[in-house]
Image (tube, rainbow, N blue to C red):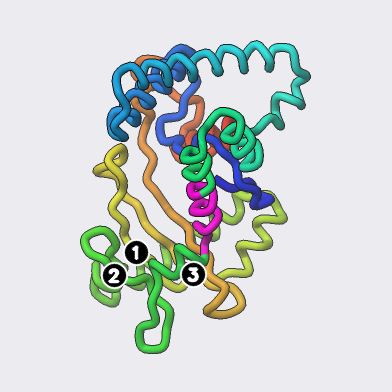
């Protein structure tokens, strides 16, 4: 992921279920995820066990290190691309280092212009989100003219409301963009059944795009066990959790 300053960081990036709860749950989910990822990538049982032990040990040692740091030091602690490359050079062989370099190169290429090139097309001289049913279906293909214009206005109102939730400098930037198209998008496995939309906005011209995602957020699956969120709006729960936990 990228920081607001567009620095490449290594961090968690899925906050749909974020909710305060026992720290042990996070460690167990981390370990389980590594087992599943290792199995999917052909690692042996012994290799997977070693990976899990190393990750849990790293978690324990990091928590001990953070306990001795000042609050601001903990707040700004992060793992950037160069740190990841250094660790790879120290602990991996040539093939592993090359894999890390390829992954970092791919991550650097994934920006708004790359997404724009895949998702947008020119239709009758105007930029639109390209149809890729059933994964991506533009609003134009979903409903007739009158209903479409009504929904389009609702999205403009929603984007304006989102702008007002931002700090002033980012709000000023967003207000320089104009909404031009909306499309429904099929979500990932963990969010099946929820609504998700891609919103295409343009700045000074057709080469100045901004793509936003509007996604429905329901209660966290952890709420039944850890208690309800203190946020009445589930979207605010997700965004607040991301801002609190993700490096910047």
Residue at the spot x=61%, y=47% of the render? 8
Q: Give the range drawn in magenta.
A: 102-112
Circle 1 is placed at which residue position? 183
Pick the front one: 65 or 169: 65
Label 1 Cα crowd, 10 Å radius (few <14 / some 14-19 / many 20+) = many
Q: Is mark 3 on a helix, strand or loop?
A: strand
Task: Inspect this view and state whether residue 236 appears.
Answer: no
Task: Inspect this view and state whether residue 78 appears.
Answer: yes
Q: Is residue 110 magenta?
A: yes
Dominant secondary-structure state across the stretch colored magenta: helix
Q: Distance between the residues labelled 2 and 1?
A: 8 Å
Residue 124, image x, y percentages: 36, 88
Extreme-left residue of the structure = 134
Residue at the spot x=70%, y=24% of the render? 74
Q: Which badge, 3 or 2, is on the more N-terminal residue?
A: 2
Circle 2 is placed at which residue position? 131
Extreme-bottom residue of the structure = 125
Residue 135, image x, y percentages: 26, 58
Q: How far apart are marks 3 and 1 (CA)?
A: 12 Å
Circle 3 is placed at which residue position? 179
On screen, residue 141 versus residue 213, left or right, reads left
Pick the front one: 69 or 107: 107
Residue 210, image x, y percentages: 53, 65
Q: Quadrant of residue 86?
A: top right
200 versus 158 height, above or below: below
Pick the front one: 160 or 23: 23
Label 2 Cα crowd, 10 Å radius (few <14 / some 14-19 / many 20+) = some
Residue at the spot x=32%, y=27% of the render? 43
Pointers 2 and 1 in contact (CB under 8 A)? Answer: yes
């Amino acid at each position: 992921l990228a920081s607001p300053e567009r620095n490449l960081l290594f961090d968690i990036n899925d906050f749909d279920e974020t909710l305060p709860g026992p720290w042990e749950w996070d460690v167990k989910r981390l370990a389980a995820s590594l087992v599943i990822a290792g199995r999917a990538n052909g690692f042996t049982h012994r290799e997977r066990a070693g990976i899990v032990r190393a990750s849990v040990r790293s978690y324990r040692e990091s928590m001990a290190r953070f306990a001795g740091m000042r609050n601001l030091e903990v707040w700004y602690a992060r793992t950037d691309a160069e740190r990841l490359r250094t660790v790879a050079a120290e602990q991996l062989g040539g093939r592993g280092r090359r894999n890390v370099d390829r992954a970092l190169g791919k991550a650097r290429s994934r920006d708004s212009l790359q997404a724009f090139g895949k998702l947008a097309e020119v239709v009758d001289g105007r930029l639109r989100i390209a149809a890729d049913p059933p994964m991506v279906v533009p609003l134009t293909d979903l409903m007739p003219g009158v209903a479409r214009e009504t929904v389009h206005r609702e999205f403009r109102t929603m984007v304006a409301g989102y702008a007002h939730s931002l700090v002033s400098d980012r709000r000023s930037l967003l207000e320089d963009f104009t909404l031009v198209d909306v499309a429904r998008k099929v979500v990932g496995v963990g969010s099946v059944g929820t609504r998700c939309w891609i919103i295409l906005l343009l700045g000074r011209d057709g080469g100045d795009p901004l793509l936003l995602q509007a996604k429905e957020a329901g209660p966290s699956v952890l709420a039944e066990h850890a208690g309800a969120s203190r946020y009445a709006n589930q979207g605010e729960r997700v965004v607040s959790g991301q801002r609190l936990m993700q490096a910047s």
